[in-house]
Amino acid sequence: MKKILFLLTVLSIVSCGEKKEDNGKLQVVTTTTMITDLVENIGGDLVDVNGLMGSGIDPHLYKASQGDVRKLDGADVIFYNGLHLEGKLVEVFEKMNEQGKTTIAISDGVSEKSLIGSEYFASNYDPHIWFDLTYWNEITYYVTEKLIELDPENKLAYEANRDAYRLKLIDLRAALNVKIQELPKERRILVTAHDAFNYFGRTFDFEVVGLQGISTATEAGVKDVQRITDFIIENKINAVFIESSVPRRTVEALQAAVKAQNHDVKIGGELFSDALGSAGTVEGTYIGMYKHNVSTIVNALK
């Protein structure tokens, strides 16, 4: 019942909200910080971007506030991840789209055939697609096309911004490859708070193990901790990692369980999984986040 009332409230506000200020720029609302950063790079000065989620926010559990609803009402277009990453917001976006608001799932920019399947997630796919650099390149094209459809007069500017950003992504991949070569293949085992890094693992040949599974909506239990404890000891893993958008207590419990079995495992550092770092920092950008993560992983696992 609460879910129905929330949807009705959102749709009511969207249909009768105040008219947005017209400054000549495309008004864009984004969900995750990764999407916000991408749209800002492609849109540049041609767009005003309002992100719903900030640093350290878990999109799996996110609930829209009244302020968010006002942002959604004033948007010309809403970009979201899709594949049920945003959980409770998906139905809101679908209903808004039916009422004429342009809502775009960036995951539609990649082929389902190559997605990593997950029977434990509502979409049946792992939604953490930003960790696949090939996907992110394809999504860069997809978002650019959608912005041009809404603002065709600035087509050349959007394409120029896209091409400049793609060159940065090419440089990023090269830099990450160099850094990862410092780590022997047998040590490329990544244990984190939740299973957000499967696309990263596929891209850079890491075995990835998450304590909580793909969605943080499901708490890790005693059996999960024991299973990963046995895995760490068996594979002589020397470091596990916390995540900025997931409470660290589960990883600390894992560390204690490993220690109780007379094996030391350190917390290798904090990774950014479902959100970028703080705005205005290097880690507050997609490229900076990825470099930070890889450096943290490699340096801890050496």
Image: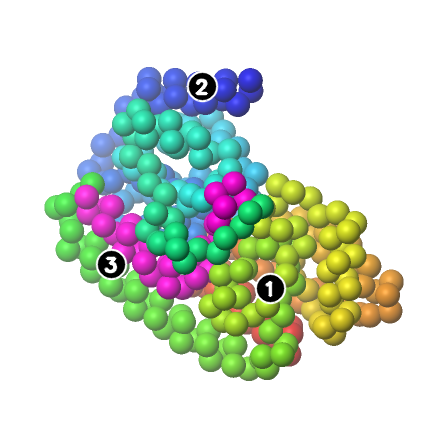
Image coordinates of residue 190 in percent, x first then y, are 62, 66
Can residue 254 be seen here? The reply is no
Image coordinates of residue 38 in percent, x first then y, are 36, 53
Label 1 or label 3, whichever lies nearer to me, is 1
Q: Residue furthest left?
A: 153
Q: Is residue 124 above or below residue 100?
A: below
Instruction: Examine the image and state in which quarter residue 258 appears.
Output: bottom right
Tag on residue 161? 3
- Asked whether 124 or 99 is in front, the reply is 124
* Identity, as a three-letter code, of the amino acid under mark 3: Asn
Give yes or no for contact between labels 1 and 2 (Cβ–Cβ under 8 Å).
no
Decide if residue 95 is on the left or right side of residue 277: left
Residues at marks 1 and 3, CA–CA distance in whole angstroms: 34 Å
**Image: magenta residue range:** 121-149
Q: Secondary structure at mark 2?
A: helix
The residue singled out by tag 1 in the image is 208
Tag on residue 9? 2
Q: Is residue 296 above or below residue 116?
A: below
Q: Indicate whether residue 265 is drawn in magenta.
A: no
- Dot 1 or dot 3: first in sequence order is 3
Give yes or no for contact between labels 2 and 3 (Cβ–Cβ under 8 Å).
no
Label 2 or label 3, whichever lies nearer to me, is 2
